[in-house]
Amino acid sequence: MSDGADPKNLVREAYRIEGITEPECRSIFLDWALSLAPGADVRAALGVLLERHGQASDHPMTAVLRSGLEQAAAPRRRGGWRGRPRGAA
């Protein structure tokens, strides 16, 4: 069953793969992020996935999801450089 938090069931399937590694989970995470609907609330989707799967605390996908949630929470500066133009005196 797919939903807005995991539209292609990528995360669900990652938890079913025996012996999956963290680098493989990061690759799946990228595919998951690209499969979200435009404008989707990534933090909310990650929260749903952690609530659903987070009890598997020793699974590498749980670590990747937690890292993604931390990254999504960190404010980032957007836009270009805002200073004097190069060569300006």
Image (cartoon, rainbow, N blue to C red):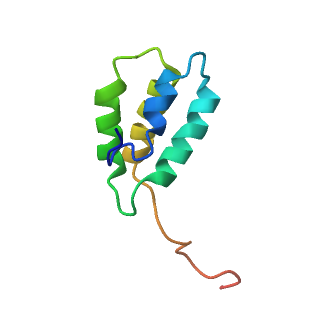
Direction right: furthest residue: 87
Question: Height in image: 26 above or below 75?
Answer: above
Q: Give x and y (percent) for residue 63.
A: 47, 26
- Kindly identify the residue that appears in the image at 48 percent across and 49 percent down: 33
The answer to whether any part of residue 41 appears in the image is: yes
- Kindly identify the residue that appears in the image at 40 percent across and 63 percent down: 38
Q: Is residue 17 left or right of residue 87?
A: left
- Splitting the image into 4 quarters, where does residue 23 fall? top right
Q: Is residue 62 left or right of residue 45?
A: right
For the N terminus, the image quarter is: top left
The answer to whether any part of residue 63 appears in the image is: no
For the C terminus, the image quarter is: bottom right
- Splitting the image into 4 quarters, where does residue 46 fall? top left
Residues 56 and 16: in front is: 16
Residues 7 and 59: in front is: 7
Direction front: furthest residue: 1
Q: How many marks?
A: 0
Question: Height in image: 67 above or below 21?
Answer: below
Q: Give x and y (percent) for residue 59.
A: 48, 18
- Splitting the image into 4 quarters, where does residue 47 fall? top left
Residues 75 and 14: in front is: 14
Q: Give x and y (percent) for residue 60.
A: 52, 22
Q: Give x and y (percent) for residue 88.
A: 66, 85
- Kindly identify the residue that appears in the image at 35 percent across and 23 percent down: 54
Direction bottom: furthest residue: 88
- Kindly identify the residue that appears in the image at 34 percent across and 57 percent down: 40
Q: Is residue 47 left or right of residue 20?
A: left
